Each structure stands twice: as C-alpha cells, then as structure tokens.
Image (spheres, grey):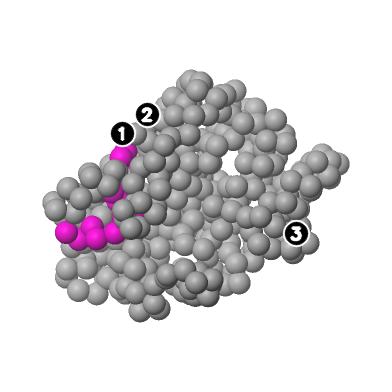
Amino acid sequence: MNFWEAEVNPTKASLLNCVLPTFHQFCQTHLNQPPETMLALLWDLWLPLSMKLASHRQDLGRPLIQGVLGGQGTGKTTMCQVLCKLLQELGYRTVSLSLDDLYKTYADRLILTQQDPRLIWRGPPGTHDLDLGLKVLDQIRQGASPVSIPRFDKSAYNGAGDRTTPEIVENIDIVLFEGWFVGVRPINPDVFNHAPPPIVTEEDRVFARDMNRRLSDYLPLWERLDSLIILYPTDYRYSMTWRQQAEQQMIATGKSGMSDAQIEEFVKYFWRSLHPELFITPLVESPKGVDLVITINSDHSLGGVYPK
C-alpha cells in the first residue's frame, strides 16, 4: 500500500512484536478468528494507522478527536478496538466513543416518538443527545481528567436500549469517535426530487428532507473532529447482505434474530433517512473534510487506503 511507504518499518516491526501476544488473544476472544488470518490487516492497516494517530496527537499538543465514519458491517467497531490496543502499547490512553453512546434516554425517545411517529428506530438524526456529546468532547479537548464517557445498553427495555453506567476515564490522549453518519453533512434538499430507491414516494422524500434538515444540528459536533476516516464499501448495498449474514449467524447460535424481510425493512429505513449514495459518496469524492478513505470489499476484506 503506497500510502504507508513513508512509515518507518523498524518502528512498525518493533510495535508488531510488542502487540502480538495481546493481538492473538484479542482475535480469539473478540473476533473469533485465527490470529494468522488477521496478521496482514494488522500489518497493512492497523499498525501504520495507529502510528499516524500517535503522530497526529503529538503534533496537536492536546487530545486528538478522530472521527470514524462507517456503516453496518464495515468493521469500524473492530478497528477502533484494535487501535485502542495498539495505541496503548505506544503509550497513549485511547477511548472509543460511539455515536450510539449519545442516544437520548429511553424515556426521552418515547416522547420523541410521540412527537414524530416516523422515528420508529433509534439511529437517525434527532435521536441523539447532542449537548451531551458536545460536553464530553469539549472536556476531552480541554484536557479535563477524569471524564465521564457515556455508555448505552442496547439490550435494555427488550432491545429498545437505554443509558447505562458511564465509564470514568483519566488522562485521555485520543478519542475514536465512530458512527454510521459521523461527519456527514446536510445536502441540497433539491437532490431528493430525484433520489435513488428506496426514496420513492412523496412521503419518503419528506422524511429524507426532514432528516437532512436535522443533520444541521450535528454540525457543531463534527466541528470538534480533528480528522475523519471513512470506511467505504465499494457498494453500499453490501450492508444489507452483511446484516443478513450477521443475523443468520446469531440465529444459528440459538439467539433470536430478524428475518431477511425484517432486515430489509430495517436497512431501507436508514437508507431513506440518510442515503449512502447521497451523503457518503460526495464526502468520499470531496477534496476536503476527509483525511483517509478505506474501501471495503464484499467479503469484508480491505480494498485500498486513499489519503485525501
């Protein structure tokens, strides 16, 4: 990968030797994958990326807020977990914060659903506590310690989810702020006049425009980002297949899961709210606002790494 040629291989090799025992254990306990199958990804992407983040933190002279944008199945959660381990080996206290951790409470979302019955699932713009997000990121940027990091329990209230006990973290160096629309910006509402499926009815278009308008409320949160990485499927429709595969695996272990028809309804709901073709593709193609694009193939393998 040409992007990483500037990396100092001796430093990279030294880091690899340091993290291999921890990485082997992580693969077995968290990824359920043989460590040998993940070594190429560790060497090609995760190691050099962790070194880049450490360097960026040093240059800033204050805590780094790194945005990670990625949809269902792109591997953003796994990548953030691995980067936290690697950066810890480099001496940086790193915390992962998901956009999901900023969801409004269960009680507040019940009120929200009464105000707007279209918000049948948590996730779209409007379902997050933006003041909480701003407070946490500002505290971290200003070097406060300790910081109370909000956490969200998706299993609460039979899967509706609710806030849970926050995590108290001291001396944070780097925040990996990840989510399915982190960094995504509003677009010209006229675009929805000729939007791709599943935005097909006038009701769909009204919903899409309303979600686009609510996205403006998130701009102050995105302004706290020092950098943005996009995990970009070579075809956004892979997320449907990935979700179906994940549910089938879950059902195979004896747990309950959604049927293919339910998954299709679920995924298309989010495509109607913020369609990847309309919101994420322009970000990827834009010359500004994004620092790194990592493409993901249909089998979850790494397609390429492209600096912006």
Q: Amino acid at mark 1?
A: Asp
Residue 236 in the figure: left or right of residue 221: right
What residue sits right under mark 2 in the picture?
Answer: 135
Question: Which quarter of the picture shows residue 39?
Answer: bottom right
Viewer-closest of 206 and 300: 300
Which x, y percent locates residue 134?
Answer: 37, 32
Give how far across and how far down residue 51 sits, in percent: 70, 40
Question: Is any part of residue 47 visible from this angle?
Answer: yes
Residue 163 percent location from the top left of the image: 35, 42
Give the numbered dot on residue 131.
1
For the residue carrying disc 3, how many other residues have a C-alpha within 10 Å: few (<14), some (14-19), or many (20+)?
A: some
Q: Given this view, does label 3 or label 2 mark the residue nearer the observer? A: 3
Is 303 within the magenta? no
Type of the residue with mark 2: Lys
> Magenta stretch: dominant SS?
loop
Disc 2, SS? helix
Residue bounds of the magenta highlight: 117-130
Closer to the eye: label 3 or 1: 3
Which residue is under mark 3?
35
Task: Provide the secondary structure element on which disc 1 rests.
Answer: helix
Q: What amino acid type is highlighted by mark number 3? A: Pro
